[in-house]
Amino acid sequence: MGDRKPAADDTASEHPRAKVGRVRIEDVAKQAGVSMKTVSRVLNNEPNVSPRTRTLVEEAVEKLRYRPLPSARVLAGRRSYLVAMLFDNPSSNYLMEIELGVLDACQAQHYNLMLAPLVYDANDIIDKVEALVMQAQVDGVILTPPITDDVALLRRLEELGIPYSSLSAKEQNRHVGVVVDEHGAVCAMMAHLASLGHRRIAHVRGHPAHSASAWRLAGYREGLRRAGLRYEAQLVVDGEFSYESGYAATNALLDLEGRPTAIFAANDDMAAGAICAICERGLSVPGDISVCGFDDTPIAHQIYPALTTVRQPTREMGRLATSELLKEVRELGSGGIVDVAYALQLRRSTGPARAAD
């Protein structure tokens, strides 16, 4: 049988986030019955276009879902000097530090920043990002976890010619941005706890949508193995990178018949919740239970006792991710991946394991 053109309904079963091929400005002009120059005037919000003509063009744009490529603006020397930071992350401390770093880079290079909160698993996330990019005419976007690993979104940004930079993306999604050896960092933290005599070390996991949760769990398990300690599934409790989830997870761990002598929480917010739960039980940190976290956000210094944690320089990561993005904006292919060093911050929340009574 010969080839046939696909019927209109052939794409009806596609994922709701799938996109059709790119529409050209010529298609919009034909649909509206006007010239390409008139379409351009409407898109650029220029004067001397009648209300009726403007409406015809806008209706054609909406019907055809036309989106002008931002790369065409750049080629024409029409940069907006605006970048957007896309985020959906329960840790306000982490986001605040990243945002400050992004602002540092923007101010140094005379760029403005737009903050764009999203729901990472919403079916319309691509539509929302596309609308934001086109309406604000941003030159590029900074992606934070877990949005960094939304493959469909990354593909659409590439189709639209939108440069992007990611923080802590999975290896297969790393093009421009920053990363930290989170697995190695957690192994080092586990070695520290083992050196203090801890043998029952619990872990409060992060949100499953974040790559960091898997990396930190893997580091926890590998750290146990290197220390000659047995992995116990009951000592691993799910969290969501929030203070409240750390509090709830720790209460579950404290209800175990053989409670842990140390808790490694996958971020500082959950570690702070853990300390609160422990103290409410009349126990002491680190006298009865040691607690450590990951990130070294401001809360690590604000709680008592001060938190032992892994320092990933989140503000510097935001700055570097933005600097790499702006390189990419100026010249395609010039941005890259920067590997940022971590460091253990040993403070008063960890101490020697308490001897068995």
Image (cartoon, helix red, strand yellow):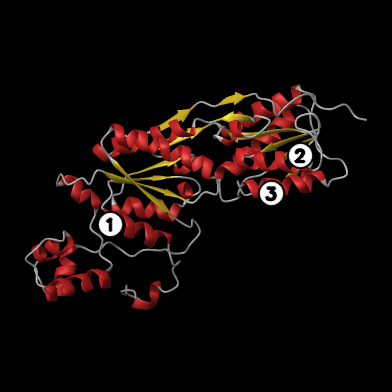
Q: Position of residue 84 (x, y in %)?
A: 35, 47
Return the residue at label 3: 238
Per the image, label 1 sits on a secondary structure element best described as helix
Provide residue 237's location: percent of width, then percent of height.
Answer: 72, 47
Residue 239 can be seen in this image: no
Image point (18%, 68%), residue name: 27
Alpha-carbon span between mark 2 and mark 1 = 50 Å
Q: Which residue is mark 2?
A: 279
Residue at 46% x, 46% y is 148
Question: Is label 2 in a helix, a strand or a loop?
Answer: helix
Q: Residues within 10 Å of mark 2 (few under 14, many from 20)?
A: few
Q: Which residue is mark 1?
A: 134
Question: CA gap, disc 2 to disc 3?
Answer: 21 Å
Q: Split into 4 quadrants, where in the image is the C terminus? A: top right
Q: Residue at (36%, 63%) from the top-left corner?
A: 19
Kind of residue indicated by mark 3:
Asp
Vertically, is 253 above or below 64?
Answer: above
Question: Are the two marked residues, 3 and 1, in contact with CB atoms closer than 8 angstroms?
Answer: no
